[in-house]
């Protein structure tokens, strides 16, 4: 049994996801140019996807790239949501 003054600490978040990273110029067009956490990058990209209705209605796991996302996705017209994270990593320093 723990002593009353010694409480368990909550597990710490993974620092790799919360550490600010610098987006490339192409990615900054979507998420902004200031350093931002990787998790926030993904959230902002999803906001952009949903706001602009860029999910394939026939296959929700597929992202249809607009002009901004095409630059991030290496010129591809569409990528899977799993492939998207690989492309995002290429634009973060």
Image: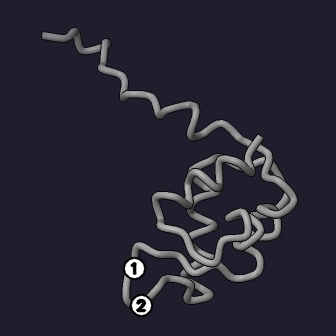
The one nearer the camera, 59 or 19, is 59
Q: Position of residue 37 (x, y in %)?
A: 65, 46
Q: Secondary structure at mark 2?
A: loop
Q: Is residue 29 left or right of residue 66?
A: right
Q: How is the image coloured?
A: one colour
Q: Position of residue 76 (x, y in %)?
A: 66, 71
Q: Residue drawn at (82%, 63%), measured in percent from left and top?
A: 26
Q: Which quarter of the figure has residue 21?
A: top right
Question: Which residue, given by chain and number where applicable, does mark 2 sit on?
Answer: 57
In the image, farthest residue toward the left: 1
Q: Secondary structure at mark 1?
A: strand
The one nearer the camera, 66 or 47, is 66
Q: Are there few (<14), some (14-19), or many (20+) residues within 10 Å of tag 2? A: few
Q: Are marks 2 and 1 in contact (CB under 8 Å)?
A: yes
Q: Position of residue 5 (x, y in %)?
A: 31, 13
Q: Is residue 58 left or right of residue 19?
A: left
- The quarter of the image holding the C terminus is top right
Q: Residue drawn at (56%, 40%), measured in percent from left and top?
A: 17
Question: Which residue, given by chain and number where applicable, does mark 1 sit on?
Answer: 60
Report the Cα–Cα distance between label 2 and label 1: 6 Å
Q: Are there few (<14), some (14-19), or many (20+) residues within 10 Å of tag 1? A: few
Q: Residue drawn at (57%, 81%), measured in percent from left and top?
A: 64
């Amino acid at each position: 049994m723990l002593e009353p003054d010694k409480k368990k600490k909550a597990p710490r978040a993974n620092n790799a996801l919360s550490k600010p990273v610098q987006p490339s110029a192409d990615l900054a067009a979507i998420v902004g140019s200031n350093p931002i956490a990787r998790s926030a990058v993904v959230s902002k990209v999803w906001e952009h996807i949903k706001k602009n209705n860029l999910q394939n209605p026939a296959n929700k796991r597929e992202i249809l790239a607009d002009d901004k996302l095409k630059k991030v996705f290496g010129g591809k017209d569409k990528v899977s949501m799993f492939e998207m994270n690989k492309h995002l990593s290429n634009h973060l320093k």
